[in-house]
Image (spheres, coloured by chain):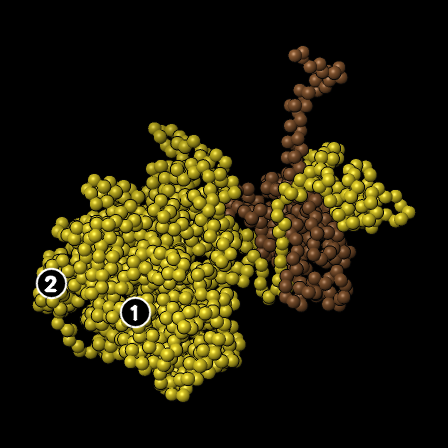
C-alpha cells in the first residue's frame, strides 16, 4: 500500500503543528483557568434583584450615608441588608404607589422577607467581620467599589484570599480617616501611603495574616 | 456561544464598538449598565441593542466594566480585550461554574436592639430535681445556642454542670414530641392544642362538681413559686384536689432525717469554704447535687496549696463519686455499713467505745483506724468541719450525722439549716405510694402528670402502669411521647424550659426566673400554662401569671414595669433566700442494726448489696441526649452504656470478668446486665446506674416504635420501694457471654506488669504530691521529689531555646525563638481542683459544634471530644487513689503537628495559638500522628449526615454560627475557643479599649464549676494565668519533648492525714 501523499500546503502546517500541539492545550488551560478564576467570575457579577433598588439614586443623588440602611456595620460582622421597614421610612410617602416598590410594601405589610440576591458572597468557612474594618479606617468603596454609581450592585473586587492578604500585608494605601469611611470617591491631597501610616499608628492597627484571623 | 443568552444576534462585540450608554472612559457620569437604548434615529448594532433587553444591559455592563479600570491587576486593558473574546465564550461556562446563588432575607421589621450576627444573652433557670441553677443563655439571631451560668446569681454563679450544658440539645431534639396526642380505642391520634385545652378544662370542670375530690396532680419536684401559687389557688377553689410529687432520684431522706433530728424537715446547707475537714458518708457533693456548683466553688477555695494550707476530705462510700475521687482518704464500704460506721464515729467523738456499736466492720483494722483517725481530725477541727451524708442513706443516718455535726459545733458555722417551704409534703416515695393506692382503688377520676416518667421509673412493686389503667382521665405533660404518655389518655407536648415562662429556686432558696428565648418550636405547653387552666386563669398569659407571682415575692406591685425589667435582666430576686433557721436538736434513738449491718465488709453466701444511683442520663430523662450518652463517665470512662460496677475482689470471688453479661437478681426480679470491674468499688456492693434501657426515648435512646434498640440496661426493673436506694440479698451470676463496651480509656490494667507500666508513665504525666512535700519544696533550698515538680519546673513551660551549654550560648532548636508583640495566650489547669465532672467536655461540644459518633465508632477510638479527661489510678485496685488530667490542645510553640502538614492547614499564629484551617486540610492525618498528646480529632465520616434528613433539620439550629461545621476528611482540634478570642478582640478594638483579664473565657473555663481552668494573656504580668504559670507546682505536659506548650498544669497537691498515710496502699483485701 503506497504511503499517503499529503498535499503541498500541509508542509507549512507541519511546522506549526508542533507548536499547536504543545501550545494549544496550554493556551486552552490558561484561558479556561482565567475564565473560571475569581477575577473573571466574580468581578462583574451583577445579579438581578427582586426590587430595582438603585444605589446610584439613593446614595449618589440623594446622598444617603451607607450606614443609614446598613446600620449594623460598626457593631456586627454583617453589614445587614436593611429590613423593609427602613425603606418604608421614606416610601410610605414617597412613591407610595410605585409598582417597583411593590415587593417592599408587601414585605412590610405581610411580614415576609424580600429575597435579595447576595452579591458579595464569601465561602462559608471565611468569617469576615465588617465592624473590624469599618471602625479602623477601611472605606466601604475599597472593597465594594463606587456603589454610589451603581444602578444595580455589582461586585468590583475579586474578594479572594490573595486580594485580602494584599491589603493585610500592606494596608497603608487603603486606609482613610474614620470619618471618611463612607465617602465615595475619596481622594486625599496627601500621599495615601504616608497618610495610611499615620492613621495606622493613630488607630493602633496591626492587621494579622494568621489563619485564625478569618478561618475558625 | 449559542449557550449565551446575552445577545440574540450571537455576535461578539469587539472592544471598540462601545454602546453610547456605556462610558467606561470616564469614572463619573451616567450610571453604569443602564442603557436607555438608541433612539430610532441612532445607530444600533443588534436586535438586542434595539430591544434594549435587560440581558443586553447586563451584557454591556459586564463587557465594559469600569471595574477593569479600577482593577489594579497586572492584566492590562489590551490583554483583557484579547482574552475577552474567549472569556465572552466562557461567560457561558462561568455561568455554570459560578457558585450557587445565595439569598439574603432580612426581617421585614427588625426588633429593637437586635443586631444580626451579634449574640444576646438572657437570664434563665435550669431546674433539675426541684432546684434551679441560674443561667445566662446566649442567643444568636433569635434562638438559643449556648448555655452558661449566670455570673451574678448569688448561689450558682457563672459556672454550669454537664447536664445543664447538655440540656439545650433537648430543645432541638428531633425526637421531641411535636403534637398533642390522645388515646382512642388503643390508638394514638394527633390532636390540636385546642383539644388539649378542652381536655384540661374538662378535667377542671369535672373536678369542680366534687370540690376537687378525685382530681390528683402528680408533679415532678419543683420549687417554683408560681406553681406553688397556682397550686394554692387550685386547692383553695377545690379543696379535694390532691397534690403529689415524685422524683426517681430523691433527696427526701435528708428532709426526713432532719425532721427526726430537729422536728422539722429542714434543708441542710454546707459551707465547704469554711471547713478544713470534710467527711462524706456515701455523699456526692459535686456532680448533680442540688448545690453542686456552690460546693465545687467552695471546695476549690480550700484547694490553694500555695497558701500553705489546704482542706482535707475523707470519703466513705460504696461506689466512686466525684467527691471520693478528689478525697485525700477513701474507705470503700457497702452503703449498708455507713450507719454502723457513723455510729462508731459518734462513739469515738464522744469518747465512747467504738466496739459498743456492735458492728463487725468497726473491728476490722482498716475501718477502725479510719474512723479513729477521722474522729481525731474532726475533733481538732470543731466548728470547721463537715460531716455529710448522701441522699442514698435512710433518714436515720442523716439524723445521726446532724447529731454529730451538733457535737462538733458545726451548726451555724459550716452546717446550716433552712426551713422548707412545703413542710407537710411526704417523702416522694410515700407520696407516690399513696397515689398508686388511690389509683388502684378507683378513687382517682382525673390525673394530671406534669413532667416525670413514672411508668418507667416508679418502683416495680407499685405497678404504676396497671394503676393508670384504672384512672378515668389521665393527662401527661411531657417533652417526649414516652413510656408514661403511652398509657395516659392525653399526651400534651411540653415546651422546653428555654421556650417557656417559669421560675424556680436554687438550693439556697434564691428565686430564679426562667424566661423564654424563643417561641415554643412546636407550640408546647409549660407547667405554668397547664396549671393556670386548672386555676381558672385561661385568659391570662403565662408571662402575666409568672410576673404577678414573682413581683409579689420581690415585694413590688404587679404593675411595676421597672421592677419587672430588672428581674428579667438579673434573672433572680436578690435577697429571696431564707435566712438560716435556728435549730433545736431533738433526742432520738437510732434503730438497732440489721443483721447485714452487723456483718463485716465481706458478705456471706454470695449475697451482695445493690446500690441504685444516677447515671449520665440522670434518672433516664436524658436518655435521648446524645451528648450525655457519649460523654465518658468520670470513673468508668464508659459511653453509650451503663454497667453493673463490681470491685476487683468481688469480681474475682464471683468469677466474672469485665464486659461479661451477668444475671443480677434482687428479690424476685432478674436483670441481665454487663459487668464493669471498677477499682475502688466496695467489696460486696454492686452499683447499678439508673436511667437506661428505655423503650420510648427516641432514635438515640431507644424506641419500640422505631425499632431502635435502647442503649444500656434498664436497672429500674430491679428497684422496689423496699430497696429504693440500696437493697441487700442480691445475687450475681455470670453467664459467660460477653458484651462489647465502648470505653474511651483502657480498662485498668489488672496484671502486675501493666499496672507498673501505667504507674511509671502516670508519674510523668500527672504530677501529684502532698501538701507537706509542697511546702518543703518551696522552702529555700527545698528539693523536689521525683513525682512532684521541681522548683523551676515552670521554666520548662517556656523552654528557653538558647541555653548555656558548656559555657556557650547555643540555640538547641532548629527554629528561632518567637517574639510576641501582641497578645500571648496561655492557659493553666489546676489539677488539684479538677473533680472530673465533665462540664468542660460538654460545654466544648456545645460551643464548637462537635459531632457525636455513636457507640461503634467510640469503640474504634473515634470519639470527637476536643477536651478529654484522662483518669489515672494509683495503688491497690481495690481502693486506688484517683486523679484526673483534662487534656486539650496544648498549643505548643514548637508544635510537632505544624511542621508535618503537607498543605499547611495548621499553622502557628502570632499570638501563640495553633490555628486549624479546615478548608485547607486534605486529611493526611500526619499531624494527629505527630501530636504527642493525641488531642487531634479526625472526621473519619460525615458525622453530621443525619442533619440533612428533613426531620432532623431542626438540630442544625443549635450549631454555633461562629464555628465551622466540619465535614468528612477534615482534622479538628481544640482552638482555645479562638472564635471567642477574636470576637472579644474585635469588640474591644472597635470600642478602643483594652481587654481585661478574665474577659475572654474559653467554653471549658466558663463551665468549670471549680474554675480549675484559667485562660488569659501571658504578656499581662498581673493576669491570673501568668501568676499560675509561675507557681512552683506548674509544669508542662511531656515537657521533655521540647514542644514548649502554652498550657501549664498545676500539680495536684493532696493533704493526707499523716496518721492514715499511706492510706491508699492496702495490703489486705
* Alpha carbon separation for disc pair 2 and 1: 31 Å
Figure chain in yellow: B
**Relative to residue B780, is residue B1040 depicted above or below?**
above
Q: Where is residue B863 in the image (x, y as percent from the top left)?
A: 38, 48
| Residue behind mark 2 | B599
Which residue sits at x=58%, y=51%? A129
Figure chain in brown: A
Q: Specify the subunit that label 1 lies on.
A: B
Residues packed near mark 1 inside 10 Å, few (<14), some (14 to 19) or many (20 plus): many
Look at the image and tell me whether residue B675 can be seen. yes
Q: In which quarter of the image is residue B674?
A: bottom left
The reply, left or right, for residue B998 in relation to residue B662 is right
Q: Residue furthest right?
A: B41
Q: Residue B458 carries which label?
A: 1
Q: Quadrant of residue B225?
A: bottom left
Which residue sits at x=42%, y=53%? B845
Q: What count of labels does the image hold?
A: 2
Which of A48 and B66 lies nearest the eye of the viewer? A48
Q: Where is residue A77 in the image (x, y as percent from the top left)?
A: 58, 53
Which of B68 and A211 lies nearest the eye of the viewer? B68
Q: Which residue lies furthest to the top in this view?
A: A2
Quarter of the picture holding the N terminus of chain B: top right
The reply, left or right, for residue B439 in relation to residue A56 is left
Which residue sits at x=66%, y=30%? A28
Amino acid at each position: 500500500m503506497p504511503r499517503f501523499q499529503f498535499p503541498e500546503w500541509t508542509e507549512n502546517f507541519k511546522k506549526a503543528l508542533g507548536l499547536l500541539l504543545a501550545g494549544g492545550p496550554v493556551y486552552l488551560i490558561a484561558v479556561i483557568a482565567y475564565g473560571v478564576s475569581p477575577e473573571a467570575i466574580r468581578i462583574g457579577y451583577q445579579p438581578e434583584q427582586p426590587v430595582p433598588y438603585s444605589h446610584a439614586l439613593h446614595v449618589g443623588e440623594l446622598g444617603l450615608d451607607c450606614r443609614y440602611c446598613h446600620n449594623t456595620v460598626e457593631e456586627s460582622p454583617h453589614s445587614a441588608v436593611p429590613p423593609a421597614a427602613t425603606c418604608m421610612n421614606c416610601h410610605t410617602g414617597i412613591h407610595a404607589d410605585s409598582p417597583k416598590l411593590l415587593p417592599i410594601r408587601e414585605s412590610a405589610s405581610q411580614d415576609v422577607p424580600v429575597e435579595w440576591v447576595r452579591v458579595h458572597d464569601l465561602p462559608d468557612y471565611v468569617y469576615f467581620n465588617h465592624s473590624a474594618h469599618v471602625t479602623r479606617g477601611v472605606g466601604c468603596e475599597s472593597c465594594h467599589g463606587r456603589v454610589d454609581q451603581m444602578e444595580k450592585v455589582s461586585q468590583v473586587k475579586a474578594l479572594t484570599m490573595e486580594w485580602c492578604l494584599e491589603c493585610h500585608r500592606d494596608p497603608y494605601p487603603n486606609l482613610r480617616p474614620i470619618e471618611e469611611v463612607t465617602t465615595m470617591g475619596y481622594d486625599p491631597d496627601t500621599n495615601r501611603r504616608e497618610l495610611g501610616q499615620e492613621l495606622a499608628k493613630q488607630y493602633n492597627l496591626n492587621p494579622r495574616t494568621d489563619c485564625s484571623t478569618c478561618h475558625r | 456561544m449559542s449557550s449565551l443568552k446575552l445577545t440574540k444576534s450571537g455576535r461578539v462585540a469587539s472592544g471598540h464598538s462601545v454602546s453610547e450608554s456605556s462610558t467606561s472612559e470616564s469614572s463619573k457620569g451616567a450610571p453604569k449598565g443602564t442603557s436607555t437604548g438608541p433612539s430610532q434615529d441612532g445607530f444600533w448594532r443588534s436586535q438586542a441593542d434595539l430591544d434594549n433587553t435587560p440581558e443586553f444591559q447586563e451584557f454591556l455592563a459586564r463587557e465594559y466594566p469600569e471595574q477593569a479600570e479600577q482593577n489594579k491587576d497586572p492584566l492590562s486593558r489590551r490583554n483583557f480585550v484579547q482574552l475577552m473574546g474567549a472569556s465572552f465564550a466562557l461567560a457561558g461556562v462561568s455561568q455554570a461554574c459560578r457558585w450557587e446563588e445565595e439569598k439574603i432575607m432580612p426581617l421585614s421589621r427588625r426588633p429593637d436592639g437586635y443586631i444580626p450576627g451579634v449574640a444576646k444573652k438572657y437570664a434563665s433557670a435550669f431546674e433539675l430535681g426541684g432546684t434551679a441553677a441560674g443561667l445566662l443563655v446566649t442567643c444568636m439571631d433569635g434562638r438559643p445556642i449556648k448555655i452558661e451560668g449566670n455570673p451574678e446569681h448569688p448561689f450558682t454563679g457563672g459556672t454550669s454542670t454537664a447536664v445543664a450544658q447538655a440540656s439545650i440539645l433537648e430543645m432541638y431534639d428531633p425526637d421531641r414530641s411535636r403534637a398533642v396526642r390522645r388515646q382512642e380505642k388503643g390508638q394514638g391520634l394527633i390532636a390540636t392544642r385546642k383539644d388539649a385545652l378542652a381536655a384540661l378544662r374538662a378535667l377542671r370542670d369535672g373536678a369542680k362538681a366534687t370540690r376537687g375530690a378525685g382530681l390528683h396532680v402528680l408533679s415532678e419536684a419543683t420549687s417554683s413559686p408560681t406553681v406553688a401559687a397556682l397550686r394554692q389557688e387550685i386547692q383553695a377553689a377545690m379543696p379535694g384536689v390532691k397534690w403529689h410529687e415524685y422524683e426517681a432520684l430523691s433527696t427526701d431522706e435528708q428532709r426526713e432525717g432532719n425532721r427526726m433530728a430537729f422536728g422539722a424537715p429542714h434543708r441542710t446547707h454546707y459551707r465547704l469554704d469554711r471547713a478544713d475537714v470534710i467527711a462524706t458518708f456515701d455523699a456526692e457533693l459535686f456532680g448533680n447535687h442540688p448545690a453542686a456548683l456552690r460546693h465545687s466553688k467552695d471546695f476549690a477555695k480550700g484547694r490553694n496549696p500555695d497558701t500553705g494550707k489546704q482542706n482535707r476530705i475523707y470519703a466513705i462510700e460504696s461506689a466512686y463519686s466525684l467527691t471520693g475521687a478528689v478525697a485525700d482518704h477513701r474507705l470503700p464500704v457497702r452503703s449498708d455499713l455507713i450507719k454502723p460506721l457513723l455510729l462508731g464515729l459518734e462513739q469515738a467523738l464522744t469518747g465512747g467505745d467504738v466496739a459498743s456499736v456492735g458492728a463487725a466492720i468497726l473491728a476490722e483494722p482498716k475501718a477502725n483506724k479510719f474512723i479513729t483517725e477521722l474522729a481525731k481530725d474532726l475533733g481538732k477541727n470543731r466548728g470547721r468541719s463537715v460531716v455529710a451524708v448522701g441522699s442514698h442513706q435512710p433518714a436515720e443516718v442523716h439524723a445521726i450525722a446532724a447529731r454529730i455535726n451538733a457535737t462538733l459545733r458545726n451548726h451555724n458555722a459550716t452546717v446550716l439549716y433552712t426551713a422548707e417551704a412545703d413542710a407537710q409534703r411526704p417523702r416522694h416515695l410515700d407520696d407516690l405510694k399513696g397515689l398508686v393506692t388511690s389509683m388502684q382503688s378507683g378513687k382517682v377520676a382525673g390525673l394530671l402528670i406534669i413532667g416525670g416518667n413514672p411508668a418507667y421509673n416508679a418502683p416495680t412493686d407499685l405497678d404504676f402502669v396497671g394503676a393508670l389503667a384504672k384512672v378515668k382521665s389521665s393527662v401527661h405533660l411531657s417533652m417526649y411521647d414516652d413510656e408514661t404518655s403511652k398509657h395516659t389518655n392525653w399526651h400534651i407536648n411540653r415546651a422546653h424550659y428555654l421556650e417557656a415562662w417559669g421560675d424556680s429556686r436554687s438550693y439556697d432558696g434564691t428565686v430564679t426566673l426562667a424566661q423564654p428565648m424563643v417561641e415554643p418550636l412546636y407550640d408546647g405547653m409549660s407547667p405554668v400554662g397547664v396549671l393556670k387552666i386548672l386555676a381558672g386563669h385561661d385568659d391570662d398569659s403565662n408571662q402575666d401569671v409568672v410576673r404577678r407571682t414573682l413581683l409579689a415575692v420581690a415585694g413590688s406591685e404587679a404593675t411595676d414595669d421597672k421592677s419587672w425589667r430588672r428581674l428579667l435582666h438579673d434573672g433572680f430576686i436578690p435577697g429571696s433566700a431564707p435566712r438560716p433557721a435556728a435549730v433545736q436538736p431533738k433526742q432520738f434513738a437510732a434503730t438497732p442494726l440489721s443483721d447485714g449491718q452487723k456483718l463485716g465488709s465481706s458478705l456471706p453466701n454470695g449475697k451482695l448489696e445493690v446500690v441504685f444511683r444516677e447515671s449520665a442520663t440522670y434518672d433516664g430523662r436524658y436518655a435521648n441526649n446524645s451528648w450525655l450518652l457519649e460523654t465518658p463517665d468520670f470513673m468508668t470512662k464508659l459511653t453509650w452504656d451503663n454497667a453493673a460496677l463490681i470491685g476487683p475482689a468481688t469480681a474475682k470471688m464471683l468469677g466474672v470478668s469485665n464486659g461479661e453479661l451477668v444475671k443480677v437478681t434482687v428479690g424476685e426480679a432478674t436483670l441481665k446486665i454487663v459487668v464493669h470491674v471498677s477499682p475502688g468499688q466496695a467489696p460486696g456492693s454492686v452499683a447499678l446506674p439508673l436511667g437506661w434501657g428505655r423503650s420510648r426515648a427516641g432514635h438515640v435512646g431507644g424506641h419500640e416504635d422505631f425499632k431502635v434498640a435502647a442503649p444500656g440496661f434498664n436497672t429500674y426493673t430491679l428497684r422496689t420501694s423496699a430497696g429504693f436506694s440500696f437493697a441487700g440479698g442480691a445475687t450475681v451470676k455470670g453467664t459467660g457471654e460477653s458484651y462489647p463496651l465502648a470505653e474511651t480509656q483502657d480498662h485498668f490494667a489488672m496484671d502486675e506488669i501493666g499496672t507498673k507500666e501505667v504507674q511509671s508513665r502516670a508519674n510523668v504525666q500527672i504530677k501529684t504530691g502532698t501538701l507537706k512535700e509542697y511546702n518543703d519544696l518551696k522552702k529555700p533550698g527545698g528539693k523536689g521529689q521525683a513525682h512532684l515538680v521541681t522548683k523551676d519546673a515552670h521554666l520548662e513551660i517556656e523552654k528557653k531555646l538558647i541555653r548555656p551549654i558548656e559555657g556557650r550560648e547555643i540555640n538547641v532548636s532548629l527554629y528561632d525563638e518567637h517574639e510576641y508583640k501582641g497578645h500571648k495566650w496561655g492557659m493553666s489547669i489546676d489539677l488539684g481542683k479538677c473533680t472530673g465532672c465533665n462540664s468542660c467536655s460538654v460545654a466544648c461540644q456545645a460551643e464548637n459544634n462537635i459531632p457525636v459518633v455513636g457507640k461503634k465508632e467510640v469503640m474504634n477510638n473515634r470519639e470527637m471530644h476536643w477536651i478529654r479527661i484522662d483518669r489515672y489510678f494509683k495503688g491497690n485496685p481495690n481502693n486506688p487513689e484517683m486523679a484526673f488530667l483534662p487534656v486539650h490542645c496544648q498549643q505548643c510553640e514548637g508544635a510537632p503537628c505544624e511542621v508535618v502538614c503537607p498543605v499547611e492547614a495548621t499553622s502557628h499564629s502570632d499570638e501563640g495559638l495553633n490555628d486549624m484551617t479546615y478548608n485547607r486540610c486534605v486529611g493526611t492525618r500526619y499531624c494527629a500522628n505527630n501530636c504527642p498528646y493525641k488531642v487531634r480529632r479526625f472526621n473519619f465520616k460525615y458525622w453530621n449526615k443525619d442533619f440533612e434528613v428533613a426531620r432532623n433539620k431542626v438540630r442544625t439550629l443549635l450549631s454555633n454560627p461562629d464555628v465551622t461545621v466540619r465535614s468528612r476528611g477534615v482534622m479538628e482540634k481544640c482552638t482555645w475557643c479562638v472564635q471567642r478570642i477574636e470576637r472579644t478582640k474585635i469588640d474591644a478594638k472597635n470600642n478602643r479599649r483594652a481587654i481585661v483579664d478574665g474577659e475572654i473565657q474559653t467554653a471549658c473555663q466558663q463551665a468549670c464549676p471549680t474554675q480549675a481552668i484559667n485562660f488569659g494573656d501571658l504578656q499581662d504580668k498581673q493576669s491570673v494565668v501568668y501568676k499560675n504559670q509561675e507557681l512552683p507546682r506548674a509544669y508542662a505536659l511531656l515537657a521533655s519533648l521540647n514542644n514548649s506548650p502554652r498550657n501549664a498544669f498545676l500539680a495536684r497537691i493532696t493533704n493526707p492525714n499523716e496518721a492514715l498515710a499511706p492510706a491508699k496502699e492496702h495490703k489486705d483485701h
